[in-house]
Amino acid sequence: MLLFRRIFNFEKNKVVQSEQRLNQRYTPGPSFPLQAVLKLGDQKWPGKVSNISGNGVALIVDPVSAPADGQTAKVLLSLDRHQIELDARVIHLKPAEKGLYCGLGLSFPDFNVQKAYLQLLQPITIGQSLMAVPGDRVIQNEPQYIKQVYRGEEGSVLTVWLETKPGTPLHSFEFQMQDYFCRAKMKTGALEAYMLESAESSTAKIANPVFDTTGGLHDEIRQLFRWIVPNLSRSIPDDVRAVLLGFAA
């Protein structure tokens, strides 16, 4: 059921804070492979996720499904090989361009189901929340490159380095997602995944990159990157987006 076992391992006593922060509605990217099914009694209706938040999801469904205000339902969300079934209640209905807009409030009687759902939200919220840092606030400390920075939820930071030559081609990037990182140079074409491990030195607390991420952590970091990229906000330039999509393929 859980999408991640090593990262985003939410603690029960901190979930309330996560829920409050995730009450904003986010729209999954059009190429994000999130699928939904609305279950009304014995009937099942495919739906398209219109928006999603920490305590609700809105689907576009076929009007013939005929849900009613206040009706109890279940929502099955599928992302690649992962599936989560959620208890829901219909709280809002309105006509939509390609069907019926059905707003659903969610409840989580089981904490593992809630944790899985909050994990599902991470790639969407991180990608959609990235916003460009104004150029005058970005420290340009490498004369051979132009640095661009984008910041978002969960301490996420996308840093891009452009070469200072005609066309300013992309040289490299680093994507921080909490303490987890993916980075690549265009010259090598290889995506590296790593985490930061903190250690105390004689003078200060330092953080060292760890590339030997055994036990599946390395794969989870790469998977998170692959799921974030289809959800990137419009703040990310098209050429940067295209490069990241190439590495996420």
Image: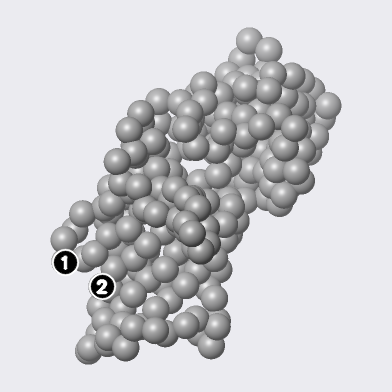
Could you tell me which residue is drawn at 32 percent across and 33 percent down? 214
Residue 91 can be seen, yes or no: yes
Q: Is residue 35 left or right of residue 168?
A: right
Q: Position of residue 205 (x, y in %)?
A: 52, 58
Image height check: is 184 above or below 48? below
> Most extreme residue toward the top, as rendered?
42
Measure how far apart labels 2 and 1 are at the Cα level: 8 Å
Disc 1 marks a residue whose amino acid type is: Lys
Q: Is residue 30 left or right of residue 170?
A: right
Residue 143: quarter of image? bottom left
Could you tell me which residue is drawn at 39 percent across and 79 percent down? 147
> Most extreme residue toward the left, as rendered?
188
Could you tell me which residue is drawn at 26 percent across and 81 percent down? 163
Q: Which mark is residue 35?
A: none
Q: Is residue 135 left or right of residue 220?
A: right
Q: Position of residue 17 (x, y in %)?
A: 75, 43
Image height check: is 59 above or below 71? below
Q: Position of residue 183 (x, y in %)?
A: 32, 58
Q: Nearer the viewer, residue 162 or 92?
A: 162
Which residue position is annotated with label 1?
187
* SS assignment at label 1: loop
Image height check: is 188 above or below 220? below
Q: Which mark is residue 171?
A: 2
* SS assignment at label 2: strand
Could you tell me which residue is drawn at 39 percent across and 54 percent down? 208
Earlier residue among tags 2 and 1? 2
Instruction: Report if the CB atoms under discs 2 and 1 are less than 8 Å apart.
Output: yes
Residue 168 can be seen, yes or no: no
Disc 2 marks a residue whose amino acid type is: His
Q: Is residue 11 left or right of residue 223?
A: right
